[in-house]
Image (spheres, coloured by chain):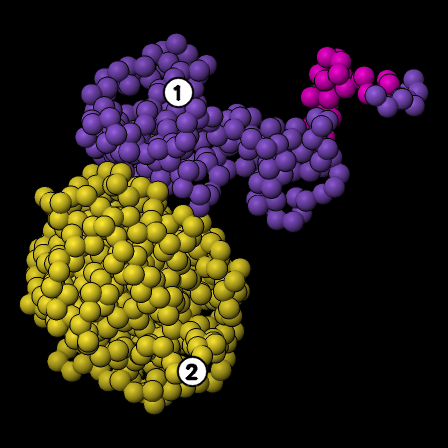
Amino acid sequence: MMPSNEGLLDRIVDWLPTTLGFKRVASWTLVPYWARRTPVKPLPGGPHPSFQRGDNVQCMMNLIMPLKIKSPIGRAEAALAIAQNKDTIYAGLNNVGTVHFARFVIVGDNICMFSVYDGDFTNYIRDFIATIGEVFNEVVKLVEGGEKVTPCEKNVEAFIQWVHERDLYQVPDTATDFLRDQEALNGDRAVSPVNDDLTLLPRKLVLQLRANANVSLGNGYRAYPGFSVAQVRKQLGLGW
Amino acid sequence: MIDFADVQGNILRGYRMPRVRYLVLEVADRLAARRWLAASTSGDGGGTPQITPGHWGANKPDTCFNIGLTYEGLRALGTPSSSLAMFPNEFIEGMNARALKLGDVGQSAPQTWPAPFNEPARIHLIATIYATEVAQLNYVQQRALAGGRAWRLLGTREGCNFPKNRVHFGYRDNIMQPRFEGVHDPQRHADGQPIAPLGTVLLGHPTNLEGLLWRVPQPEALGRNGTFNAFRVLKQDVVGFEKYLDQAASDLLKHPQVDAVLPPGAELNICQVLSIAPPSRHGALREIVAANLCGRWRDGTPLALSADVPDPKLVEAKFDYVGESRCPYGAHIRRCNPRNGQIVQRVANNSRRLVRRGVPYGPRYNGPEPGDGSGPEPERGLLGNFIGASLGAQFEAMSCDWLNLGLQDPRITGSNDPITGTNDPDTSWFDLPLKSGSTIRLRGLREFVSTRGGAYTFLPSLSAIRYLGSL
């Protein structure tokens, strides 16, 4: 270990940010100040665009949709909407053909849809609209802003965009890659040698997680290489 | 009911003129450009070339003239922001930004595209002139740019058809196109595919996906009866393609199952039909590989109907991929349009069809040049237009999931289109089917087609051109 030349003041400066009190004060004052000085745009959701075949199967969608009625009644309505359409959802999964699984989850006053699918996101959602658009309509009408994009069959482009905007940003597995995403969104202005030391708690990451409060950490971890739904079904003799 | 006079020509029916020139233009003066647009639909017959509509009556014009506008072009003309916001994302972002979806990576990446496609924000309008003679192209171009105030010419691209609808790589092209409800085209025959609803190619009409409607940019005069075009400059490595056929045929000759691919003596028939002299097993195997990569023999015979030998009588015959078709799952034409064959995305059958208008550019390849072959090959390829009412649901969906991922069939998932795909010789593969149902895997496919430019354009109706001219 290298001998330390830090004086008392250095040690205080290093220690202070680890204290709960400092973190609270920083959250209330420092972070809003930074955000005002350095506006950060929310990063787009969904998988990172890639031409690698393995990146284009078993993709993750993490959709969080705030309910209009934020109460047990609102949550019960959402639960009923899913339950009443269960058979249609199964039929839709079968006909769309590119979905590994889909889950509906209620977290707080949000209804969430988490799914794993193959191929391009817009094709996936468009095929779903064509197959079980009426279920989307039933669910989305319970969600804040949903009335602007329903019926989804008549608002295809707007609905896909609406879903995309609610899909969580997938923080890359390699921490520095989120800086690349910021650069892609903001251009070269996002590149700065300042505050990029990712061994510390960097300002850019704090501000990004202020803009994207809910994120997916990584894009899912697989225990085996990616295969499409149809490859799995064919291999198991299930028909596809 | 379709108003042909409101739809630009070459969309619902092709012109079939031998020469084409594309003028890539930037707005030099907004007001002058608007006046130019208004004049192009004025019908006065003089000055600015007149936009050719979808219906020209009894007398087909000697030259045809049409336009497509990019999103930047619509902006440059001063289209209201409320209207601009109604265009689909893929069009707003432009072709360059969609490179990963389209497989435009490596040598096809937009960063490598030559001028004028290296500055996509400056490309505002692409005007297309069709004619029989170069002098006619020159005359219309000179009229289009007369005065020099409205537009700045950034570049041109020019193509010329080969006899008998042949294209580079030697295939016969332009055999099948979608046929539309209410559109009589004497040169299109019933091909066994369902008649396409007008919404396949025009905004404001029912689409192939039941109940789904694409958004029509407002006002109605701007969006309705318009459509979108993916204009692509596609360089074709003809020498590389022919070398690959040589190599694949040589490999097959050494393969233990070669007689299952080409029974002894069968080469005589193939070589005779395709005029290959002198007949040889190697020459016939080259053609078998070429046929399987495409899904048609180079004379146009579909493998789905005649997999063992080409038969010119079957070129325009009806066929489908239902049942045990001998057309490879990964063949180019089957990937682009699986017809009613089984695919993973069951709702997508017949929903991603496109109108294709392509003309070759560059000199025709006539075999290896005399000499040591060390000189540079001239660039040759295809100036392609892929037209559909939704770039996202048709052109991009086909390019992304079908051509370059093979998601539609688990037997080809993970492979790219053997002819147009972004192939790497180290990882590429293609399964050549045998009568027995087994396959021989071919490897080492290269990127035979690379993108050298392009743009997403909106092909406005004549009403829309008048609207833009009146802004």
Q: Amino acid at mark 1?
A: Ile
Give me the chain that's yellow: B
Q: Chain of mark 2?
A: B
- Look at the picture and state if B18 lies above or below B81: below
Check disc 2 and report the residue beneath it: B371
The answer to whether A46 appears left or right of B205 in the picture is: right
Q: Chain of mark 1?
A: A
Do we see residue B396 in this rendering? no
Give me the chain that's purple: A
Q: Quadrant of residue A59?
A: top left
Q: Residue B79 colored magenta?
A: no
The image shows residue B129 at horizontal and vertical percentages of: 33, 78
User: Residue at 36% across / 56% down in the picture?
Assistant: B445
User: How many numbered dots are placed on residues in this image?
Assistant: 2
The answer to whether A86 appears left or right of A204 in the picture is: left
Tag nearer the camera, 2 or 1: 2
Magenta range: A11-35
The image shows residue B68 at horizontal and vertical percentages of: 36, 66
Q: Amino acid at mark 2?
A: Gly
Q: Quadrant of residue A105?
A: top left
> If the image is split into quadrants, where does the C terminus of chain B sit?
bottom left
Check disc 1 and report the residue beneath it: A111
